[in-house]
């Protein structure tokens, strides 16, 4: 739905960076680099971390919408299944380390301890933590 709304609202744009709400350390530089990996041969650019796709920090062209809609009609909801049906540029994380050496953009937060560690890595003092 988000891709369709964006496609209809901003006709000059042909792709979107998609991420999860539990990945607050993504930098604008990381997003720009991922956009650069979206070339003419693929409709999606996704990082590979230890050979594991990271689809929730990827760039997706609107060209995938017919495939997504067909999958929804089939009640096929797994992103990994989508990635099997489209042309993907798999981006090794080594190609991202020059702009994000610690790969903080790939870090997601699932626990209060993850949250505290992320705040600390962002420069917040321990006494300012909730």
Image: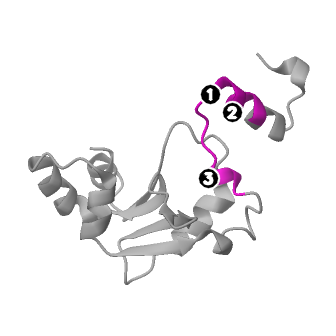
- Separation (CA) of disc 1 from disc 2: 5 Å
Q: Secondary structure at mark 3?
A: helix
Q: Position of residue 50 (x, y in %)?
A: 58, 65
Specify whether residue 57 is in view: yes
Q: Main secondary structure of the magenta part?
A: helix
Instruction: Give the quarter of the image for residue 75.
Output: top left
Q: Which residue is mark 1?
A: 111
Determine if the magenta segment contains residue 18.
no
Please report the residue visible at 35 percent of the width from the left and 72 percent of the height from the top. Answer: 43
**Above or below: residue 77 compared with residue 30:** above
Task: Tell me whether circle 1 and circle 2 mark residues in contact (CB < 8 Å).
Answer: yes
Badge 1 local density, few (<14 within 10 Å), some, or many (20+)?
few
Q: Position of residue 66 (x, y in %)?
A: 17, 61
> Seen from this angle, which residue lies furthest bottom?
41
- Would residue 52 be found to the left or right of residue 112 on screen? left
Image color mode: one colour
> Seen from this angle, which residue lies furthest left?
73
**Above or below: residue 37 compared with residue 121:** below
Q: Secondary structure at mark 2?
A: helix
- Point out which mark residue 114 bears: 2
Instruction: Give the quarter of the image for residue 127.
Output: top right
Magenta part of the protein: which range? 103-117
Q: Which residue is mark 3?
A: 106
């Amino acid at each position: 739905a988000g891709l369709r709304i964006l496609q209809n609202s901003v006709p000059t744009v042909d792709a979107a960076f998609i991420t999860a709400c539990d990945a607050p350390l993504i930098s604008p530089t990381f997003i720009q680099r991922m956009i650069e990996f979206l070339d003419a041969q693929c409709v999606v650019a996704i990082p590979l971390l230890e050979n594991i796709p990271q689809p929730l920090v990827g760039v997706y062209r609107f060209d995938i919408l017919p495939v997504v809609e067909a999958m929804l009609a089939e009640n096929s909801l797994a992103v990994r299944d989508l990635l099997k049906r489209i042309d993907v540029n798999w981006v090794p994380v080594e190609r991202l380390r020059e702009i994000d050496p610690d790969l903080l953009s790939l870090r997601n937060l699932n626990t209060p301890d993850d949250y505290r560690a992320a705040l600390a890595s962002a420069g917040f003092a321990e006494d300012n933590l909730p």
